[in-house]
């Protein structure tokens, strides 16, 4: 509860509670939008970078370590996020079905 002169809650505890409630809302209500969509964007960016690097390598130039690691990281994190969103969507659908 908020008051004009100040809150009665500890600000650290209140912000942590609000953050956890936001994550629960993301996890149970909109997992496809919060995990799968950004995951697909990241993995697409990583695959696009990979195709660009393959073209560069095919033309005889050498690959740089940093951008190559970034490409692998983007691809794997994106795929992981996409699968996490799909799994969370299935689990939340199962919970909704069991509540009915």
Image (spheres, helix red, strand yellow):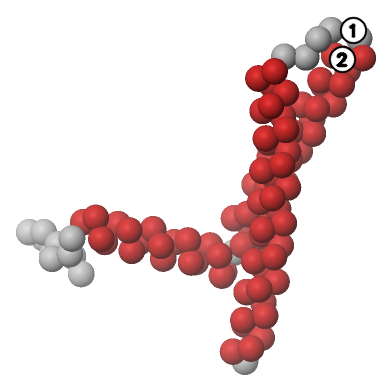
Q: Which residue is mark 1?
A: 60
**Against 45, is 21 above or below?**
below
- SS at badge 2: helix
Query: Considering the image in quadrants, where does the N terminus appear?
Result: bottom left
Q: Percent from the top left, x then y, of residue 77?
A: 66, 43
Where does label 2 land, which residue? Answer: 57
- 3 left or right, relative to 67: left
In this picture, residue 44 sits left or right of residue 25: right
Tell me the quarter of the picture where residue 99 sits: bottom right
Disc 1 is placed on an element classified as loop
The vertical placement of 15 against 76, above or below, is: below
Residue nearest the observer in this picture, 38 or 68: 68
Looking at the image, which residue sits at the far left? 5
Circles 2 and 1, Cβ within 8 Å, touching? The answer is: yes
Q: Is residue 68 visible?
A: yes
Residue 45 can be seen, yes or no: no
Q: Position of residue 9 (x, y in %)?
A: 17, 64
Determine the residue positioned at 13% across, 66% down.
8
Where does the image place residue 87, in percent across and percent down from the top left?
A: 69, 65
Residue under the point 7% across and 59% down? 5
Quarter holding residue 69: top right
Q: Residues within 10 Å of mark 1 (few under 14, many from 20)?
A: few
Quadrant of the rendering where the C terminus is positioned: bottom right
User: Which of 97/61 is in front?
Assistant: 61
The 10 Å Cα crowd at callout 2, few under 14, some 14 to 19, many 20 or more, is: few
Instruction: Name the residue rendered at 91%, 9% in the picture.
Output: 59
Q: From this view, report whether residue 27 is shown above or below residue 53.
A: below
* Residue found at the far front of this picture: 65
The residue positioned 67% from the left and 68% from the top of the image is: 89
């Amino acid at each position: 509860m908020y008051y004009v002169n100040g809150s009665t809650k500890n600000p650290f505890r209140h912000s942590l509670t609000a953050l956890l409630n936001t994550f629960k809302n993301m996890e149970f209500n909109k997992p496809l939008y919060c995990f799968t969509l950004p995951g697909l964007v990241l993995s697409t960016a990583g695959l696009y970078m990979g195709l660009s690097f393959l073209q560069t390598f095919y033309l005889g130039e050498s690959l740089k370590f940093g951008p190559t690691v970034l490409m692998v990281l983007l691809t794997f994190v994106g795929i992981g996020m996409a699968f996490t969103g799909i799994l969370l969507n299935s689990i939340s659908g199962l919970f909704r079905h069991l509540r009915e």
